[in-house]
Image (cartoon, coloured by chain):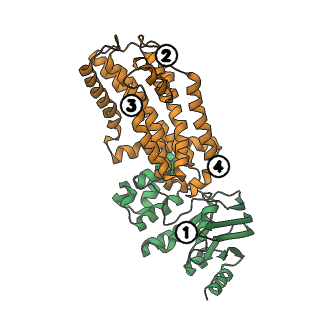
Chain colours: A green, B orange
Amino acid sequence: MIVLENATKYYKMKNEKKYILKNVSLTIPGGINVGILGRNGAGKSTLLRMLGGIDFPNSGKIYSDKRFSWPMGLAGGFQGSMTGRQNVKFVCRIFGKSQKEIDEAVEFVKEFSELGEYFDMPIKTYSSGMRLRLSFGLSLAFDFDYLLIDETLSVGDKHFKEKSKKALREKIEKSNVLLVSHAMPILRELCDAGIVVHDGQIKYFDNIDDAIKEYNQINR
Amino acid sequence: MKRKPFTIFKAVVKALVLREVQTRFGSQKLGYLWAIIDPMAMIVVFSFIKTIISHASMPGIDYPVFLATSFLAYNLFKNISLRSMDAFVANKGLFVYKQVKPFDTLVSRAIVESLIIGVATIIFICIGLYFGFDMEVKDLNMVILGFLWIGIFGFGLGVLFAVIGTFYENFKKIISLMFLPLFFLSALFYTVENLPPIARDIVLFNPVVHFIEFIHGSFFPELDTNYVDFTYMAFWTLIPFFLGLWLYTKSERKIVMS
């Protein structure tokens, strides 16, 4: 369960405040996969960051007793001067994994990401698709209650897209996903419920199809 | 299974230290060597100057040893406080993991700098033994205390610098500029006793002088710590540190989000 209590979040633009959330109170029930819809700049990514504990509302509260992954997006979360392997080890260490678990995770991510020799090259030499494969593979090596995924499933080649969807389907048998995407088929396939972020408000729909309908209304 | 905050802190600092050690090795191999070359060059230069000017102001002291203690201690202080200023920017990418707090990056950098100076010190001692310099120490415990204390002093200032520097980009440049005259005003290659009385009073406003004099006075049987003001040192250790911590707790979220 995720609770938003009078949550307000805005960014200061030149003379006005741009609201992402305006006094939003909402309860998202636990145990389900939620798709997050909204136009570009509506605040979907900010919402994910707030759930991931690295961004904060200006007032009000957002809380949950669940464990969230870091928000997985295109932006990274990697240190450019470190190699893929070093980054994987680093993340394992901050999550307190033992040396044995670290070795297993490194093997798994290396296998999954299909980076080959690039796995031992600095991240700054990676293409965005390669970063993504590393990021996605890394997140699969951990057990979270919620995976926070930002758009990443619609990038990469066909082969990897299929592979990551398959991996994600296996993963969400045990954990849940909060998925930001503009790709309706993916949302329909992976999510049960949906929320639509628009004009500083969040609407929750028990059924993802209703959320998609609402989103299409907004875009008309 | 929830981990305690301190357990997370320890895991993160350890990971950051390993990361820092790896990246320094990888990107610039001179990174570590520099810890030796820099003080070594200073020792050679100032020993040379000394032989030219050559007035026996420090009888009974091996001047290179005097310089070595100066520059190792001074570099420890300078590196910890200066390198903390870009710790937040350099580790920004890692704040996407909520376990990594900006403060942790300051702690890990200070640890890495201390380790580097520690290794440099051991190498210098070996060199000194090899060439047969007089390295008899008057009070080893006090020398160790002096090094620890100047490190903590540097860390406290570093916390303050790092937080202010996040919000005022120019602040970092000003601090870097201030370190230039500090080099000459910190009793590194002279003692306060050697100075004319007016210069003494001026130079004693510089807190670094007290730390260096404390280390020199505890190391060399020929020198004393008469000019060292421990209250002044404590003041400069505690005030910046707690001011820095206070500002940090107020702005931690902003630093994460920035």
Q: Is residue B205 left or right of residue B54?
A: right
- Residue that mark 3 sits on: B184
Circles 1 and 2: CB distance less than 8 Å? no
Q: Which residue is mark 1?
A: A150
Three-letter residue code for mark 4: Lys
Q: Nearer the viewer, mark 3 or mark 4?
A: 3
Mark 1, secondary structure of its residue? strand
Q: Is residue A157 above or below residue B175?
A: below
Q: Which secondary structure lies at badge 3?
A: helix
Q: Circle 4: is it few (<14), some (14-19), or many (20+) Cα within 10 Å?
A: few
Q: Which of pointers 2 and 3 indicates the residue nearer the eye?
A: 3
Task: Residue B59: give x, y in percent of width and height.
Answer: 34, 11
Between B125 and A68, the residue placed more toward the observer is B125
In the image, are marks 3 and 1 on the same chain? no
Residue tagged 4: B250
Mark 1, chain letter? A
Which chain letter matches label 2? Answer: B
Labels 1 and 2 positioned on one and the same chain? no
Q: Secondary structure at mark 4?
A: helix
Dot label at residue B225: 2
Q: Secondary structure at mark 2?
A: loop
Give how far across and how far down residue B220 sits, in percent. 41, 14
Label 3 vs 4, first from the N-terminus: 3
Against B122, is B95 above or below? below
Amino acid identity at mark 3 = Phe
